Image (cartoon, helix red, strand yellow):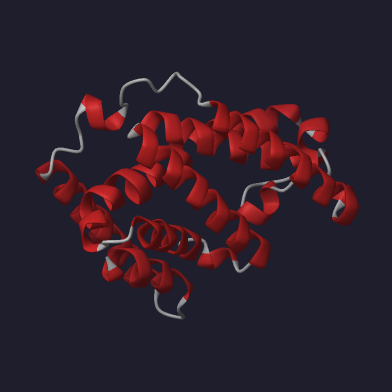
Amino acid sequence: MLLLFILSPLLIVLPIPTAVKITAILLALTYSCMVSKKVGLFTRQKLIGDGWYILPSSMVLRFSLFVVLSFLFVWLYLPDSLFSVILGNPWLWLAICFFYAIFSVYPQEFLYRLFFFQRYQILFSNPYVFLFVNGCVFSFAHLFLNNALVFTLTFVGSLLFALTFKKSQSLMLVSIEHSVYGAWLFTLGLGEMLAFPSV
C-alpha cells in the first residue's frame, strides 16, 4: 500500500530522471493489474455492479449542496473563472468532460475504490479510519498539482465517493458520481487547477 499509494505519487514530484518516474509508475500499474486479475476484479460484476443506475437521494442532496457552495466560492473569490470554459469554448468543455470521465475517473475509481477496498480494508478494524486513510491517499495522488484547494476538494470528494462505494459496491455508480462532480468543477471554470486546459 505504501509503495503504490505513497511512493508512486511522491516519485512524480521528486527531482529524478523522467525515465525513472515512468518506469516506476508502469511497474506499479502492472503490479496492480496482476493482483486485480488474480483476485478477480476484472469481472462484469466488479467492474459495473448491480443497481448502478439507481441514484440514492443522499447523493443528489450532497451534490446539490456542493453545487451551491462551490458556485458561491467561485463567484466571490474567482469571478473571472466563473463559467469561462463552457461559455468561451463549449466544445472544449464537452471534450474535457468526456475525456475526464472515461480516461481519468474510471481508472481512478478502479484503483482507489475497488482495488483499495478489496486489498486493504481487512487491515483496518475501524471502518472510519479506513475511509480516512482512503481519503488521504487519494488526495496525496494529486500532490503534483501543488494546490491546497485541490488537496481539500479531493480529500472531501474521496470521503463521499468511498461512502458511495462502500454502500453500493458499484464501481460504475461511484464513477458516475465522481464524473459529475468533476464536470461541475470544469463548468465553474476550475479545470485549470486540475491540469486541464482552459480557454
Give the percent coordinates (x, y) of residue 179.
54, 35
Identity of the residue drawn at 67% across and 56% down: 193
Left or right side of 136 for 194: right
Residue that lies at the very extreme toward the bottom in this rendered image: 15
Is residue 81 toward the left or the right of residue 2 in the image?
right
Q: How many marks?
A: 0
> Residue 154, image x and y in percent?
55, 55
Judging depth in this view, the residue of 109 and 63 nearest the camera is 63
Image quarter hosting the C terminus: top right
Taking 78 as reference, is 37 above or below it? Answer: above
- Asked whether 99 or 155 is in front, the reply is 155
The answer to whether 78 is drawn above or below residue 173 in the figure is below
Image quadrant holding the N terminus, namely bottom left
Q: Residue at x 61, y 61 (%)?
A: 152
Is residue 199 visible in the rendered image? The answer is no
Q: Quadrant of residue 189?
A: top right
Residue ID at (10%, 45%): 38
In the rendered image of this protein, does residue 123 appear above or below residue 59?
below
Which residue, as the protein is rendered here, is positioned at the far left? 38
- Quadrant assignment, res 171: top left
Q: Nearer the viewer, residue 25 or 143?
A: 143
Does residue 7 appear in this view?
Answer: yes
Q: Residue at x 84, y 43 (%)?
A: 82
Residue 25: give x, y in percent of width and height: 32, 61
Q: Position of residue 59 (x, y in %)?
A: 56, 33
- The answer to whether 18 appears left or right of 31 in the picture is right
